[in-house]
Structure formats: C-alpha cells, structure tokens
Image (cartoon, rainbow, N blue to C red):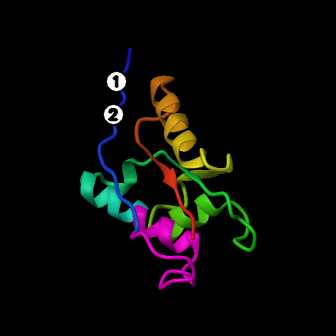
C-alpha cells in the first residue's frame, strides 16, 4: 500500500467581519496559501498534479475558484483543479479527496485545502 503524507500547511491571517481582508477575494487568498504551502514544502511546482480547494461562498467569483487560485499562484496551466462545495466540510473533504487520489495511484502530489473571504 502507498503512503500518503501531508508535507506542508499554510493559512491566511484570521480577520474580523468586514475587516482589512473584506475586499480580498477568496481566489487571491487561496493563491497566496497555495504558493506558501509549496514554498514551505520545498516542492517544485512542476510536480503538482492537481489542486483541490473547498470554497462555499462562490457567488461572484466566476467558474471554478480553485482553478483560478492555482493559476494566480503561478502553477502551470497544465495543472488541473476543482472546487469542492460541501459547506463547512469543504476544506477537509478536499484534503480527503487528495489523499484518495494518491492512495489510488491517480496522482503523486496535490495541493488541497479551503479558501473563503
């Protein structure tokens, strides 16, 4: 059986409702976190197979916020990405789906998490 490990973690600052980050989109926050997690892991972005990000409040963000965030983070256009909307469990479900992809042999390196604003 394959091993699956989390090699890095990152998060944005916690703000207050209508605070300093209120006008920052979830996509921009997600891109910042994706970039930081890859840097902390010292993982070559070329090795990323897919990005899975949870996002619940998607109104006004456009199609597939996870894909938008991965592109803004500097990952290649060839990297696939999809968004999970499972209300409060979206970020955790994203991590579980990434682990399943690795254990099933469908991918070797994924970025997974959640993004909201």
Query: x and y percent of residue 80 in the render?
Result: 58, 51
Task: Give whichever of 38, 26 is nearer the camera.
Answer: 26
Could you give the CA–CA distance between mark 1 and mark 2, rounded to whole angstroms?
7 Å
Look at 52% across and 42% down and name the residue there: 92
- Residue that carries the numbered disc 1 in the rendered image: 3
- Residue that carries the numbered disc 2 in the rendered image: 5
Asked which secondary structure carries label 1, the reply is: loop
Q: Residue lying furthest front in this view?
A: 16
The chief SS type of the magenta part is loop
Query: x and y percent of residue 68 in the render?
Result: 60, 66
Look at 53% across and 53% down and name the residue there: 79
- The quadrant in which the C terminus is found is bottom right
Q: How many marks?
A: 2
- Could you say which quadrant of the image residue 11 lies in? bottom left
Residue 72: assigned label: none
**In the rendered structure, which segment of residues is drawn in magenta?**
13-33
- The quadrant in which the N terminus is found is top left
């Amino acid at each position: 059986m394959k091993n699956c490990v989390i090699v890095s973690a990152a998060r944005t600052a916690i703000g207050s409702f209508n605070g300093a980050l209120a006008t920052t989109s979830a996509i921009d926050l997600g891109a910042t976190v994706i970039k930081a997690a890859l840097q902390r892991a010292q993982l070559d972005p070329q090795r990323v197979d897919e990005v899975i990000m949870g996002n619940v409040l998607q109104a006004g963000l456009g199609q597939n916020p996870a894909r938008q965030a991965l592109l803004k983070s500097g990952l290649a256009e060839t990297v696939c990405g999809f968004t999970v909307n499972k209300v409060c469990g979206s970020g955790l479900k994203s991590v579980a789906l990434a682990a399943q992809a690795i254990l099933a042999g469908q991918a070797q390196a994924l970025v997974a998490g959640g993004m909201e604003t």
